Each structure stands twice: as structure tokens, then as C-alpha cells.
Amino acid sequence: MEIYKHKASGKYFIFIDYVSQDSALFVNPIAKIMELELAQFDDESLENTGDYFVDNGFITEELVNHYQMYQDFRKQDAEAKNNVEVEAFFEGMSREGLEAFISRIKERLNKKE
């Protein structure tokens, strides 16, 4: 986990991901996910575990929970998109194409045994 100190407030925000060269997504001190300009933060971030940051008073457990929920949502969203892409891939194939694809998979599985 990576946190940044906000220059104006002196509070720590959890870094999520870059949005652009000049901004990023953060979990703010009241557990809201916001896009903010990087210029609002110290140049150097702190990296450690969420437990370390909570135990040492940098952030609250609620912020860590929001960060983890957001990461879980992103992972589920990515998996759902992958499933849709796989479905679209197979829907576009003819029966012969599917049979050839399955045959190639079986060949690869037999090589690994």
C-alpha cells in the first residue's frame, strides 16, 4: 500500500492509481475515493502494509477497508470484462473453428502429462 501526505491538510491519503500524468485516484481521510491533482501532495510516498499505517496512526482502518473494497471491485470488474471477451471470442467462431480450438487444447494438455 502506498500513501501520500496532503500538503495543505497534512493528512495522509491512500494512493489507488494514476488517472493521468497530473492526477490520481486516492482514498481521502473521510474514506471517499477522489481524483486529485498530484501537485497537492508531497513528492515522496510511503510504502508499507495497511496494518503498519493503521498501527502507527497514519490512516484509519476504515480507509484501508475502503481501499480493499475498491481493489476487490476492480478485480471483479476486470474478471467480468474478461468473461465477456471470452464469450464474444467463442460466439464469433464457427463449429469447425471451435472443434479445431478444442482439439489444440487437448493436444497441449496431453503434452503436459
Image: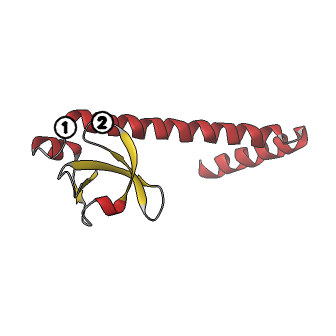
Colour mode? secondary structure
Q: Label 2: state its secondary structure.
A: loop
Q: Nearer the viewer, residue 79 or 111?
A: 79
Q: Nearer the viewer, residue 97 or 64?
A: 64
Q: Is residue 110 positioned above or below 64 on the image?
A: below
Res 78 → quadrant: top right
> Who's the residue at 29% across and 34% down the image?
65
Residue 63, position as x, y percentages in the image: 26, 37
Q: Are marks 2 and 1 in contact (CB under 8 Å)?
A: yes
Amino acid type at image mark 2 = Ala
Mark closer to the chain start, 2 or 1: 2
Left/right placement of residue 68 relative to residue 89 reads left
Res 96 → quadrant: top right
Q: Single out the mark in the foreground, 2 or 1.
A: 2
Q: Which residue is mark 2?
A: 31
Residue 105, position as x, y percentages in the image: 71, 46
Please tell me the numbered disc located at residue 85: none
- Residues at marks 2 and 1, CA–CA distance in whole angstroms: 9 Å
Q: Nearer the viewer, residue 97 or 53?
A: 53
Residue 72, position as x, y percentages in the image: 42, 36
Q: Label 1: state its secondary structure.
A: loop
